[in-house]
Each structure stands twice: as C-alpha cells, then as structure tokens.
Image (cartoon, grey):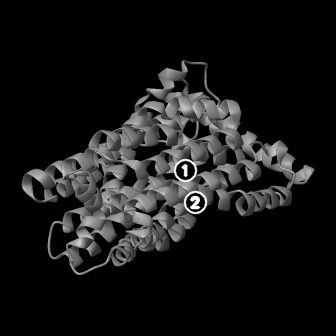
Amino acid sequence: MSAPESRAVGKFLRRMMPLLVLMLLVNNLDRTNIGFVQEDLQADVGIGATAYGLGAGLFFIGYALFEVPSNMLLERFGARVWLTRIMITWGLVIVAMCFIHNVTMFYVLRFLLGVAEAGFFPGAMLYITQWLPDAHRGRATAIFLGGSAAAGIITGPITGALLELHGAGGFAGWRWMFAIEGTFSIVVGIAAGFFLVSRIEDARWLADDEKRALRTAVARDEDVRSRAPRTSRWKLVLHPQVALLTGAFFAMTLTGYAITFWLPSLIEEIGGLSSFQVGLLSAIPAICSMLAMYPLSHFTDRAPDRRPYLALMLVLSAIGTYLATLGSPWFGLAAITLAGVGSKCAATLFWPMAQSGLDLRIAAPGLALINSLGNLGGFVSPTLFGYLKDTTGSTNGGLYTLSAASLLAVVAARYIRGARATDGAALAQGAGGTADTARAAK
C-alpha cells in the first residue's frame, strides 16, 4: 500500500467513521429502546406480551419492504443527502411514539419506524465499500459495528435514567424517553448533513495524491468484482449465494433481537432492581461483545479464510442460547452474554464476506436484500417470544429455536463464497461467468 493511500484511509477512519458510528449508535438506541418499556406499555396502554412482541417485530416488516428501494435511492442521491434524510425521519417517528395511547397506534408507529429506517445500515456499508479497498474494510466494519455494540452498552443506562423522569411535568417516564431520544436523533441527523462527504473527489480534507491513490485502490476492487459477462441484475440478486448469505444473517438477527427485546425482562426476574439498575446489567453482553469484536476482526483481516471463524462464533451463539434455558436468572444473564458475543462477532465477520462476495453491479440491491430479508429475524424472534410467554409462561422454546437456527447457519457458512477479496468474482461466475473469470480475479 502506497503512502498516499495509507494517509487517505487513515483520514477517512478518523473523520467519517466516528460520525457513522454515532449515527448507528443512535439508530440502535431508537429501534431497541422499546425493550425497556414493556411493563410500562402494559400498565398504561394495555399492551400484553403477545401484542408487544408483534409490535416490536412489525418494525422489520416495514424495514424489509422499503430496504432495497431506499438503498437504490442512496446510490442516486449520495450518502450525505439520503442517510441524513433517513435519520431525521426516524427521529420524528420516535418523537411521535411518546403519544401512543392504544395498541393500534403502537403497531402503526413501529411499522413506520421500520419504513423510516430502511436503507440506513446497508447504505452505510455501501458507503464504506465506496471509500475503502477490501484490505481495510474488515477493520472499518468492526469499528462501525462497534456502534451497535456501544448502543447495547449505553441504551440500558440512558433509557433507565430517562425512565426515572416518571411523573415529571405529569408525564410517564416512557413518554419522556421517546420524546428526548427522538429529538436527539433529529439533531444528529441535521448535523450529519453538514459533515458527511458522499464521494472521494469531494473530500476537501484529502490531498490530490491521496484522492488518486484511494480512488485507484477502490477501483481495483471494483474491477475484480465486475469481471463477469453481462447478466440480469435480478438474476444475480436471486443467486444461491445471496440466499446463503441471507439465511446466515437471518439466524444472527434471530439471536440478536431476542437478546435486545427480552433481556430486560429476564433481568427483571432477578427482582429488587430499579429501572436504572436493569439498564446497567443489560449492558453486560454488549461490553463483552465489544471486547471480543476488535481483536477478532484484526486477526481475521489477515486470515486466508473467514468462514471457519464465522462458524465458530455461530456455534458459540448456539451454546449460549441453549444454556440460557437452564439455571437461575443470573446464570441466564451469563449464558445470554455468551450468545451475544457469538452473535455480534459473527456479524463482524459476515459483512466483509458479503461485501467482497457480491458482484459490483448488484452491491447496493444485494446488500439491501440480504439485510432486509435477514432482518426479518427481528420480526420472527420477538413475535415468537411474546406468544410463547403468554401461552406457556416461558421463553425456553424460543431459545431452543435460536440454538437450532445458529447451527443451521454454520452449515450455510461452509458454502459462502467471497470469504476474501480475491474471491470477489466468484458470485458473478456462479451467475453466468466462466472459469476464466475466477482465474482473472486472482
């Protein structure tokens, strides 16, 4: 790597990644804060466990329906305009949630929140792909996903503290929580519009030689990924490799959102804890995940194949969710922490593989499709857990399902191509290329 390229990558990581991390942190805060107000919604609005699980999951239906078109619009308008638009609109919906007064309104606003947020995560991943060559994407992806893990650390304490405002001004604490967190999202979204830079050529903080070096490095990867005979974009999107990537990510989201939406309820079973204390304990899985993510991503950026490490993390997730069905609530917290580490680390390994394995011409719709369909696990998981809690009084059946899904994802991981950048043309080859295409990519 040349000196100008190294300087350019460093500047991008220092200038753009903190903003992207902050945006993802706020994104996760706003989509998951609902997990801390289940009891309040039941007491004030009459929303039971089944209705809560369905409402929590409806977010992902709206998200899935609008994810692909949103990411296509990001390609047209650029990250600065589109990511800013996404963030401001989801903040407005969160503010509106402080006025929930019945189950129907809860369902509608959760669905609209999914519509508003659609395209943010794959759009940010595409943005990283447009700015960095593959050799640096693993580190950048780990930094970015750190925002998700950091959200798990701060969501509990912040939300718990805001819930302590109960009664201030005659309003319930959960209403204050939605109003304040939604307003903060709007403010950050407006600020992002002034700092995000959509294209390498528009970065005033890069010297001319740094722009050329970075653009050349990214173009090299784009050339590798686009060496294939012309074929239908939708034929590539529906290729079995995309299905494997989607299935593996679906299993990760099943576990991730089960932890997100039901961990506070598990911790409350310990008894004698305030809202703030529940929030503090709920941060433990996220803290452990962050401690594991960065060393693992640094190591696997240099490994010849990420797949064995992905499989190992999925097995860890399966073990954790199974163990959570045994023992006391404290033991359950330890087991869920293990599952959370496996799930978060698996996602850190997964996205660089997905970025490298998709043909350039379907990168935007492909990443959006994987993310939107995979995120339907966020609908299935809370809905299933809510139904089981109301009908059986236990969520053990759901935890067994999570373990089985993670183990099935291990099988899918074995057949995912594009584990390294040099395999980037493999998906295009499988969709209609030749053996010469794969050799050329190497």
- N-terminal of the pair, mark 1 or mark 2, is 2
**To which residue does mark 1 refer?**
352
Q: Does 376 sit left or right of 135 as displayed?
A: left
Identify the residue shown where x is 81% and y is 61%: 7
Identify the residue shown where x is 79% and y is 49%: 214
Q: Residue furthest left?
A: 392
**To which residue does mark 2 refer?**
301
Picture quadrant of residue 330: bottom left
Picture quadrant of residue 412: top left
Identify the residue shown where x is 65% and y is 45%: 84
| Rendered location of residue 52, percent (x, y) | 26, 50
Label 1 crowd bin: few (<14), some (14–19), many (20+), radius 10 Å: many
- Regarding residue 309, the answer to whether it shows in the image is no
Residue 431 to residue 34: above or below: above
Amino acid type assigned to the residue bearing label 2 in the image = Asp
The answer to whether the residues at label 1 and label 2 have Cβ atoms under 8 Å apart is yes
In the depicted view, which residue is nearer to us: 88 or 134?
88
